[in-house]
């Protein structure tokens, strides 16, 4: 038990050191591993359909803030959440896999907490 805990701590610290923080979300269907790409961006791939993710992203965006722009064909949503701006991007990788990328900035500074929160809410809503 101690050995596996130690290994987990080492792996986690390596991810943090290199700027990638793993985030495990979901149950059996639609489970994904997400990672922080930068100080303001979270990204993950899922087998939840593009349409379900798009509709969930729109619902969550309308609840959390004001949508400034949306383009369903390109998979882009720009929204204002208080003093922060968030950018949601959906990318079809295959006919069953979709990538979701969320960036957020507040006063031109990274707002990773908002990006993580939006990511989790969209994944929960899409199930």
Image: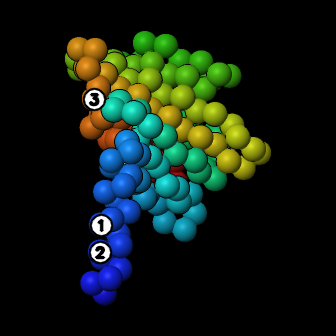
Q: Secondary structure at mark 2?
A: helix
Image position, residue 94 (x, y; %):
75, 44
The residue sitting at 72% across, 49% down in the picture is 96
Pick whichever of labels 1 and 3 is earlier in the sequence. 1
**Who comes first in sequence, dot 3 or dot 2?**
2
Name which residue lies at 34% across and 59% down.
12
Front residue of 61/21: it is 21
Residue drawn at x 38%, y 63% as measured from the top left = 11
Question: Which residue is most to the bottom?
Answer: 1
Residues at circles 1 and 2 in contact by the CB criterion of under 8 Å: yes
What separation in Å lies between label 3 and label 2 (alpha carbons)? 30 Å
Q: Which mark is residue 111?
A: 3
* Quarter of the N terminus within the rendering: bottom left
For label 1, the residue is 9
Q: Is residue 60 visible?
A: no
Q: Position of residue 5 (x, y in %)?
A: 30, 76
Separation (CA) of disc 1 from disc 2: 5 Å
Quadrant position of residue 38: top left
Task: Work out whether residue 98 or residue 66 is closer to the camera in this orientation and state it.
Answer: 98
The residue that disc 2 covers is 6
Mark-to-mark CA distance, 1 and 3 = 25 Å
């Amino acid at each position: 038990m101690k050995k596996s805990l130690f290994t987990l701590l080492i792996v986690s610290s390596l991810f943090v050191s290199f700027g990638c923080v793993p985030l495990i979300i979901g149950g059996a269907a639609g489970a994904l591993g997400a990672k922080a790409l930068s100080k303001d961006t979270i990204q993950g791939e899922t087998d939840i359909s593009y349409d379900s993710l798009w509709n969930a992203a729109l619902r969550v965006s309308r609840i959390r803030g004001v949508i400034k722009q949306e383009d369903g064909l390109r998979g882009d949503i720009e929204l204002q959440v208080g003093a922060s701006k968030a950018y949601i991007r959906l990318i079809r990788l295959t006919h069953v896999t979709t990538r979701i990328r969320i960036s957020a900035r507040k006063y031109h500074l990274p707002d990773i907490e908002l990006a993580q929160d939006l990511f989790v809410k969209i994944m929960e809503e899409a199930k």
